[in-house]
Amino acid sequence: MATGTGRPAFLASVKVDPSFEAFVEARSAGLLRLAYLLTGDRGHAEDMLQTALLRAARHWPKARAAPDAYLRRTLVNLSQDRLRRMFRRPREAPLPPEPESLPAGDPGFERVTDRRVVVAALAQLPIRQRQVVVLRFFEDLSVEQTAGLLDCSTGTVKSYTSRALSRLRQLLAAEASVTEVPDAHR
Amino acid sequence: MLTDDQFAARLTALMNEETADVGPVPGMSETLRRRRQRQAWRVRIAVAVPVAATLVATALVTTAGPGGRAAPAAVGSHGSNPRDVAYVSARTQAALANIDRYVARVENRNTAGDLLGWTWYDNQTGRSRSDLYLDGRHVESRLISGVNTDRPTALLVDYRDRTWTISTVLKALCAHNCFGAPQDPTEIRAAMASGSLALIGEEPVRGHETLHLRVTGLPKVIAMDLFVDPHTYLPVRLIAGGPTTTISDYTWLPRTPRNLAVLDLRPPPGFTRTR
């Protein structure tokens, strides 16, 4: 059975604010990218974004004043919660690939086209450093805004930023040396 | 060597580049609506279960009889009226007093499932016909007419002796059928009026949900279990427990010529009248 809007009747009892749906349509991609950089995993990022959006929907009258800030803070908190949960349970290990599902193409080509070196490097940072880097350099927040969002001092943000950049330099340099094709073979 | 600012700018570019293919999730709004609906239901259930449990417990406490047995007043789920024993009893008696539209067909069996016979009632003309079976053989038919008059008559056809007889009967005896238990609507109403009633609950009978009433304290039967339709309050089944237990299943038929013809009992040709 469907309602007049074409929506199934059993969904009709949930009141949906049109401004919330418009916000989801407009910003879900950007927020998913933020969640992806915070987690390093696409699946977890989608789960996290859904959870964050559901929280925003519940508190939409309050959140609609500054939905981006609300969602950003929720995602940061959720990424921290996720990390805590990961330490409480056995770590997930990826399943070995099925032989049939292995790509038939050139593995070197796959690696070049599907490299996510920064995402991988961010995933190796401590969560607070990762959050600072993503908020400051991906979300383009100021030191003060980042400090406010993370509930810490500006000095702490600067300290985290410095350490994170230093660590990223090392990680990216190491990655470049591994993937760089020697001149002799060009 | 890049400065921190240059490295940060490079980092920003790389992050944008590496997440450029992370596009919008298709159907995100719909997914959110479904999840919100599920959450809403979880909340409703979480609230409703304790409330319902409290209501049931309260109902059980307030309707518990003097012997401690609870009358399941909260069992009803049909309609908006409360389902306590007084309500169901009143509705059942009212329904039994208003059966002129129907011809009632009653199938009688014992607890082993053996057919004891059939009874047909037409309240409008004051006629009832009983057909008695013994070991699967049709042995007797009895038609009582004029129940609503001063001089009811009984036509009895005996298939074993191939005889028939007609006689007047006492009005007080008209209600007594050959199955030895309260069965016709008048009997049931009288039993309900004189006995102690309890509403046992809802039970399926012959594939239909019914309300189960128990009548005790009757002179001729240990207990009478009456199962009534929750909408019409007409009997669906009656189990009369006495020296022998009879199970009577009721079907309420329209007063069509074909159904009424069953009540036109005539002695078969060749049968002898006896006095």
Image (cartoon, rainbow, N blue to C red):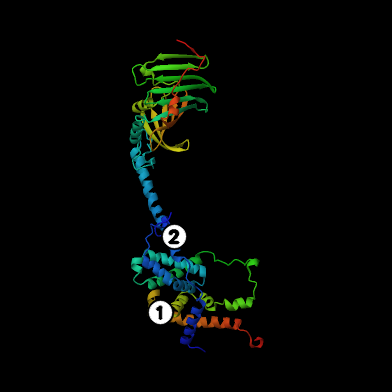
Left or right: residue B190 versus residue A100 is left
Count of picture labels: 2
Are discs 1 and 2 both within one chain?
A: no
- Residue B152: which quarter of the image? top left
Question: What mark, if any, has residue A141 been given in the picture?
Answer: 1
Residue B168: percent from the left, percent from the top?
A: 39, 14
**Residue that appears at 34% across and 71% down:** A65
Most extreme residue toward the bottom is B1
Residue to which mark 2 is pinned: B34
Indicate the chain on which mark 2 is placed: B
| Quadrant showing the C terminus of chain B | top left
**Residue that appears at 65% across and 66% down:** A100
Nearest the viewer among B265 and B91 is: B265
Indicate the chain on which mark 1 is placed: A
Element at badge 2? helix
Residue A121: percent from the left, percent from the top?
A: 53, 77
The residue under label 2 is which amino acid type? Arg
**How far is mark 1 from mark 2, CA to CA?**
33 Å
Local packing at callout 1 (Cα closer than 10 Å; few below 14, some 14-19, many 20+) is some
Circle 1 or circle 2, nearest the eye: 2
Nearest the viewer among A130 and A43 is: A43
Question: What mark, if any, has residue A70 been given in the picture?
Answer: none
Element at badge 1? loop
Left or right: residue B212 versus residue B112 is left
Residue B209: percent from the left, percent from the top?
A: 43, 38
Is B227 located above or below residue B48 in the figure? above
Is B42 located above or below residue B138 in the figure? below
The residue under label 1 is which amino acid type? Leu
Q: Is any atom of residue A151 visible in this view? A: no
